[in-house]
Image (tube, grey):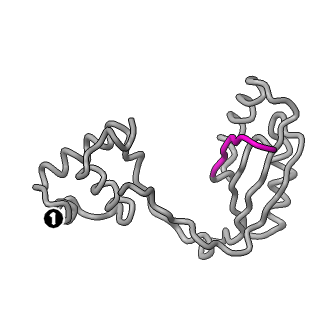
Amino acid sequence: MSLEDIDKIDRRILSILQGDGRITNLDLAERIGLSPTATSERLRRLTKEGYIAGFSARLDPQKLGFGLLVFIEVMLDKTTPDVFDQFAEAVRKAPSVLECHMVAGGFDYLVKTRFADMQAYRNFLGQVLWTLPGVRETRTYAVMEEIKNDGPLPLG
């Protein structure tokens, strides 16, 4: 599946939903110029085909006590399939990990986390991250200012 597999109306629907996931079917239908029934059918198909992965609320981490955003480079002691699998399985179970990406380059994984403060991060580092299978080295990048964190996909 790719962007070329869907038409201009589907791309418009997805673009609108990225900006407002709570839009009513009626409002969405009016904005794209289709009937509510046709719009609903397209939404069902886009969800079934996996273009729409789900819906959720974007929460304010500052207000909820998670103001410290931290990115961590992780290097493993071995880069073998079994070590990759063990690390991936363990990191999926770590609730403090918001995102984890295997990357190409000078390290193996880029991990995104959020905490109340540096002490909470330090606890995570010692009690969670360093206990994950295969971790050899980490580099921490505490974010001083978030410039953009809600960028929609450029669907055209």
Quarter occupied by residue 1: top left
Q: Residues within 10 Å of mark 1 (few under 14, many from 20)?
A: few
Q: Tag 1: residue type? A: Glu
Report the front residue among 41 and 15: 15
| 65 with respect to 148 (left or right) | right
Q: Is residue 103 above or below residue 125?
A: above
Q: Residue at x 19, y 49 (%)?
A: 40
Q: Which residue is mark 1?
A: 30
Report the front residue among 126 and 41: 41
Q: Position of residue 21 (x, y in %)?
A: 35, 61
Q: Quadrant of the C terminus?
A: bottom left
Question: Is residue 103 a member of the stretch shown in magenta?
Answer: yes
Q: Residue at x 61, y 73 (%)?
A: 147
Q: Residue at x 77, y 66 (%)?
A: 142
| 77 with respect to 80 (left or right) | right
Quarter occupied by residue 25: bottom left
Q: Residue at x 28, y 64 (%)?
A: 23
